[in-house]
């Protein structure tokens, strides 16, 4: 598929009919009662039964053929550099490949793999603003990459955060990947960032790249970042008692990632459930990393956490969509009127032992992706990465 040169406008009306299962992304009501969605101008304009929706004069009509539809998946933790290239694995096309895994939005946790990444304050601000601008103007295969996440370095002052915010930067890279590692230092800078509307994520666990360090639970709690980044480690996790302490000791986001410790991830999920705080759980890949890029990383997390964590598959889809959208203040991730028309259409994989899509995921199988839509525009059909689905949507 050709790479998109920039954000595109949906032309005319999109109608998706014959939806067999509607996954809303909303924990309060994860399964919706609708078989038709209409999008106009890249936004959801109608949700309901076909007889109750204005489906006339559609420019594009998709027959879902009974497939499930969910919001596009959101990867809460990636490390992009420029375009659709990662020097971490000398790989091209990793973002476009993630589209084939149902991902429509990615959130940068820092452009830390850039060769020669500047660590002086002028340079790190310039890199953040450049990354923010570049991905605002360029969407690989249509995927939205929210980037420009500067890593905290010693010597930064409040005016630096005001300058970054005024330039459009809305994220901090993982706290702890730079020279700021002590909780008291991070807390002051995180507070400055929050004052100017910049969201923060903190590294958790053992070091992952040169320059990073061990960040324990006490440091995470003292820093008080908005997101507990890869609570299950990237890759080395904290002891489970510290992970429990983090879940119980604050109300910040609990981010579980593919490139982390599976036992720690399952434990964090269980702790969140016991606390009645599943709304805090969000999913990421933490890729590209030493283990590579993971085009199916979010789907694999949904299946793994559902099957081994004994959580309904529809709940895990909320963690991969609506929870992240609300926590990250995105306009996508939920099947709601006015939200971005970002959709994943999928079905049970052929020969799965599950009785239907959700049951197959509860049994640990990945679904087959049949189509992905971003801002009301069809971006890919049958996935080249997932197993073949029993049913596949079609443009009619």
Image (tube, rainbow, N blue to C red):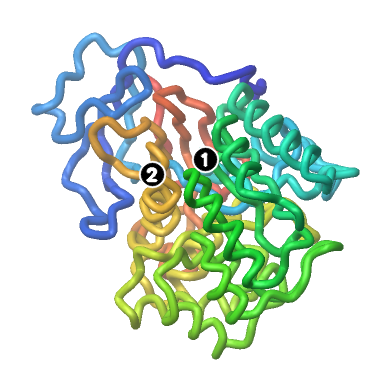
Frontmost residue, 390 versus 28 = 28
Quarter occupied by residue 55: top left
**Residue at the spot of label 2:** 333
Left or right of residue 122, residue 110 in this image: left
- Examine the rendered structure and indicate whether residue 90 appears above or below residue 143: below
Disc 2 and disc 1 in contact, CB within 8 angstroms: yes
The quadrant of the picture occupied by the N terminus is: top right
Residue 297 pos. (x, y %): 60, 56
The residue lying at 55 percent from left, 55 percent from top is 200
Disc 2 residue crowd, few under 14, some 14–19, many 20+, Cα 10 Å: many
The residue lying at 65 percent from left, 42 percent from top is 160
The quadrant of the picture occupied by the C terminus is: top left
Q: Residue reaching furthest left? A: 52
Residue 71 pos. (x, y %): 38, 43
Frontmost residue, 242 versus 122 = 122
Residue 151 pos. (x, y %): 71, 52
- Examine the rendered structure and indicate whether residue 118 appears above or below residue 227: above
| Number of numbered discs visible in the structure rendering | 2
Q: Which of marks 2 and 1 is nearer the N terminus?
A: 1
Question: What secondary structure is found at the residue carrying circle 1?
Answer: strand
In space, the residues marked 2 and 1 are separated at their CA atoms by 9 Å
Q: Does residue 353 appear anywhere in the picture? A: no
Disc 1 residue crowd, few under 14, some 14–19, many 20+, Cα 10 Å: many
The residue lying at 28 percent from left, 59 percent from top is 27
Frontmost residue, 37 versus 370 = 37
Q: Residue reaching furthest right? A: 116
- Examine the rendered structure and indicate whether residue 359 appears above or below residue 377: below
**Residue at the spot of label 1:** 105
Question: What secondary structure is found at the residue carrying circle 2?
Answer: loop
Left or right of residue 197, residue 88 in this image: right
């Amino acid at each position: 598929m050709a790479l998109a040169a920039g954000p595109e406008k949906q032309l005319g009306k999109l109608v998706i009919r014959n939806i067999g299962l509607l996954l809303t992304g909303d924990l309060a009501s994860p399964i919706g009662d609708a078989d038709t969605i209409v999008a106009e101008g890249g936004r959801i304009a109608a949700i309901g039964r076909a007889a109750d929706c204005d489906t006339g004069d559609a420019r594009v009509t998709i027959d879902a053929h009974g497939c499930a539809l969910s919001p596009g998946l959101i990867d809460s933790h990636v490390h992009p550099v420029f375009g659709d290239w990662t020097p971490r694995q000398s790989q091209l096309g990793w973002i476009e490949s993630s589209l084939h895994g149902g991902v429509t939005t990615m959130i940068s946790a820092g452009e830390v793999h850039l060769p020669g990444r500047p660590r002086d304050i002028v340079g790190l601000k310039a890199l953040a603003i450049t990354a923010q601008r570049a991905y605002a103007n360029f969407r690989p295969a249509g995927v939205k990459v929210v980037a420009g996440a500067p890593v905290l370095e010693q010597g930064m002052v409040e005016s630096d955060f005001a300058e970054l915010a005024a330039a459009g930067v809305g994220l901090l890279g993982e706290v702890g990947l730079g020279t700021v590692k002590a909780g008291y230092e991070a807390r002051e800078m995180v507070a400055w960032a929050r004052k100017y509307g910049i969201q923060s994520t903190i590294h958790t666990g053992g070091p992952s790249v040169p320059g990073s360090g061990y960040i324990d639970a006490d440091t995470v709690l003292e820093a008080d970042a908005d997101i507990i980044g890869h609570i299950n480690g990237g890759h080395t996790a904290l002891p489970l008692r510290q992970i429990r302490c983090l879940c119980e000791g604050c109300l910040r986001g609990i981010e579980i990632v593919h490139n982390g410790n599976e036992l720690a991830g399952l434990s964090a999920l269980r702790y969140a459930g016991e606390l009645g705080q599943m709304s805090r759980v969000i999913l990421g890949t933490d890729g590209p990393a030493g283990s590579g890029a993971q085009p199916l990383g979010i789907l694999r997390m949904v299946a793994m956490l559902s099957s081994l964590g004994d959580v309904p598959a529809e709940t895990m889809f909320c963690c991969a969509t609506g929870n992240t959208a609300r926590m990250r203040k995105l306009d996508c991730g939920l099947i709601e009127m006015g939200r971005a028309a970002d959709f994943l259409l999928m079905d049970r994989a052929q020969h799965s032992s599950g009785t239907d899509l959700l049951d197959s995921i509860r049994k640990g199988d990945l679904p087959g992706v049949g189509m992905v839509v971003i801002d009301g525009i069809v971006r890919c059909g049958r996935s080249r990465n997932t197993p073949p689905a029993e049913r596949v949507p079609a443009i009619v």
